[in-house]
Amino acid sequence: MAVYTQVSAEALTRFLERYDHGALVSAKGIAEGVQNSNYLVDTDAGRFILTLYEERTETADLPFFLALLDHLAADGNPVPRALPDRGGAAIQALEGRPACLIEFLNGVSVSHPTPAQAHAAGAALGQLHASLAGFAQTRANPLGADRWRTMLAQCGRAIDVIEAGFHDRVAEALDAVLAAWPRDLPVAAIHSDLFPDNVLMLGDRVTGLIDFYFACTDIRAYDLAVMHTAWAFDARGDGYDAAVGNALVAGYETRFPLSYAERAALPVLAQGACLRFLLTRAWDWLNTPADALVTRKDPLAYWRRLRSYQSRNLFA
């Protein structure tokens, strides 16, 4: 989550008049994340999330995201649905952007997950995958493996300002990962961004899975690999916590067992996940507007993770 588009109190008041969810009391921008603009909105009837969809989110993709959330919610998954206005419309316009008023879920995201929390989060992802086995809609992954060379080219040699010689080292790692990339694993709808800040918890219990705006159709086990890269390392990407990483995979398998081929592919899938987040972080590092209320994230943290996956099998 982040704030790129500012919303005036007057515009938000008029926006809320379309709903039966009370009058505006307060609104606060949420700085975390990189995809869209988000506000925590309190009315005299409750608390909500307001999301304005920025240029990285295609308006044509919104029906896919909302249908996916409705499907998951109907199967008992703790996900936030977009709320319809009095006329039944969930997608609105606000400050020149498509916008939705979204359910607020209780819970907090953990900065330093314990093995018990990782086990619960892994189980939540496994349940999500079990539920999505019956979801028919598809969306190509705009940040999938077939796009990584283009993403590096878009960053170009400017990426070397992050670290000298970085472009060539990333290109070499990318060649190796793409040469080993699996082509015959099961494909399904996935979250593809289930970082700790997208999982809400109360104690060791998952109360919310949020921020589905990278959701797409891709290798299902890649979703678990993405989660492993995000949960099992410290913020710098230096320290690997084997107890957390193992608990995450074990929790997942309580709800959705991995095949032999999927488990064998996890090391290269995790390396690919590291490259995907390294490249998008590098692009944002180079291009984030100076006045945006958003926290830039260090691309090198994912380079360090990649080196760990290259040096040993963290899924053994």
Image (cartoon, grey):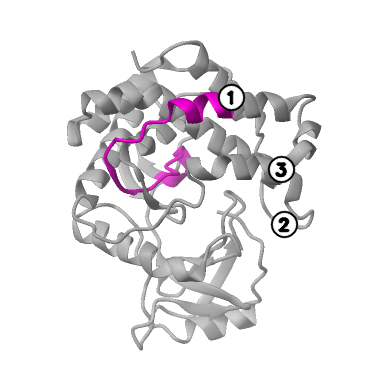
Position of residue 232 measured from the top left corner of the image (x, y, whole percent): 45, 24
Judging from the image, what secondary structure is the residue with disc 1 in?
A: helix
10 Å neighbourhood of mark 3: few (<14), some, or many (≥20)? some
What residue is pinned by disc 1?
A: 173
Numbered circle sitting on residue 155: 3
Three-letter amino acid code at the position of disc 1: Ala
> Which residue is located at x 77 percent, y 24 percent?
165
Q: Answer with the quarter of the image where residue 183 lies.
A: top left
What residue is pinned by disc 2?
A: 292
Judging from the image, what secondary structure is the residue with disc 3 in?
A: helix
Nearest the viewer among 290 and 6 is 290
10 Å neighbourhood of mark 1: few (<14), some, or many (≥20)? some
Dot 2 or dot 3, earlier in sequence: 3
Mark 1–mark 2 Cα distance, whole angstroms, equals 31 Å
> Which residue is located at x 68 percent, y 42 percent?
153
Residue 11 vertical placement versus 262 (above, below)? below
Say whether residue 305 is visible. Answer: yes
Q: Nearer the viewer, mark 2 or mark 3?
A: 3
- Give left or right: position of 289 versus 43: right
Q: Quadrant of the C terminus?
A: top left
Position of residue 227 measured from the top left corner of the image (x, y, whole percent): 41, 34
Position of residue 40 measured from the top left corner of the image (x, y, whole percent): 52, 62
Q: Which residues are magenta?
A: 173-199
Judging from the image, what secondary structure is the residue with disc 2 in?
A: loop
Residue 197 vertical placement versus 288 (above, below)? above
> Which residue is located at x 36 percent, y 78 percent?
84
Three-letter amino acid code at the position of disc 3: Cys
